[in-house]
Image (tube, rainbow, N blue to C red):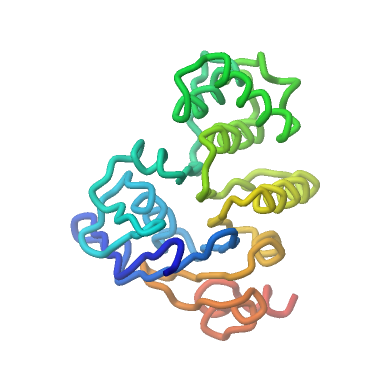
Amino acid sequence: MNWLFVEKLNKRFGGLVAVRDFDMTVEEREIVGLIGPNGAGKTTVFNIIACYYQPDSGRVIFQGKDLVGMKPFHVCKLGIARTFQVTKPFINNTVLENVMVGAFIRTSNTRLAKKKALEILEELDFLEQKDALGIELTTVDHKRLELARALATDPKLLLLDEVMAGLTPAEKMSMLNLLRNIQKQGITLIVVEHDMKAVMNLCERIILMHRGEKLIEGPPSLVANNPRAIAAYLGEDYATA
């Protein structure tokens, strides 16, 4: 049985078909890249897996449990966490308090939640800013805070939505190393990302979406050289490079 099994997902918003007959399987401890142009349906797939949206039809099975119909906090308790393209920290709370919010999904003990949050901040090299307010952070630090809060929920599956957007090349390299270390801790990753160099270096398998459908799936080398992938998203310049 696949660890995560997504079958025939369909989601429509009025006359717009956002996701059409989308299938995906993910094995435990795998890193899968979900790529495609804006509007391809990637974030909608994330929202369905995390139960922010309910599909019009289809199934999402995680470790043998059907997630369709569940609430987001139930899914989080099962071990699925996510980050968002547009970060929304609690701007009047400190970094530490923001991360503690994630930790409270596992404990009602404030001391234990604080301990977990501090461990995560140290892992992300973010400890020096633990007392900074959310409103004081840069866009890049908002991204790190989003990741820290997700990790504090102690996830088994982490859905990362453009976590490297806005980072410098050096920061992206640091983030790639961090994500590899997260995988080594036993956490499975599905990554939505537009930086193709980063995603091809990080992911073991790539799924390319186009107009709500899965267009191509395979190892990075196969996708990078596929004529349909080049025409739909990567472009000739990427193929030449």
Residue 127 as seen in the image, left or right of residue 199: right
- 127 or 70, nearer to the observer: 70
Q: Is residue 158 left or right of residue 215?
A: right
Residue 20: where, in percent of width, then height?
30, 69
Relative to 68, residue 125 above or below:
above
On screen, 120 above or below 130? below
Rendered residue at 71%/35% (across/down) = 124
> Given the current orientation, which residue lies at the most extreme right position?
170
Identify which residue, 94 or 64, lies in the foreground. Answer: 64
Question: How many marks are shown on the rendered structure?
Answer: 0
From the viewer's perspective, tell me whether residue 147 is left or right of residue 56: right
Provide residue 209's location: percent of width, then percent of height. Answer: 45, 69
Quarter of the rendering occupied by the N terminus: bottom left
**Above or below — where is 97 with respect to 1?**
above
- Tell me which corner region of the image, top left, top right, bottom left or bottom right, holds residue 233: bottom right
Quadrant into which the C terminus falls = bottom right
With 35 as the anchor, is 181 left or right in this view?
Answer: right
Q: Residue at x 50, y 29 (%)?
A: 102
Residue for point 54% across, 49% down: 160
Foreground pick, 167 / 32: 32
Q: Residue furthest bottom?
A: 227
Q: Residue at x 72, y 80 (%)?
A: 240
Above or below 166: residue 25: below
Image location of residue 153, percent across then percent down: 51, 35
Q: Position of residue 183 (x, y in %)?
A: 65, 53
Which image quarter: residue 55?
bottom left
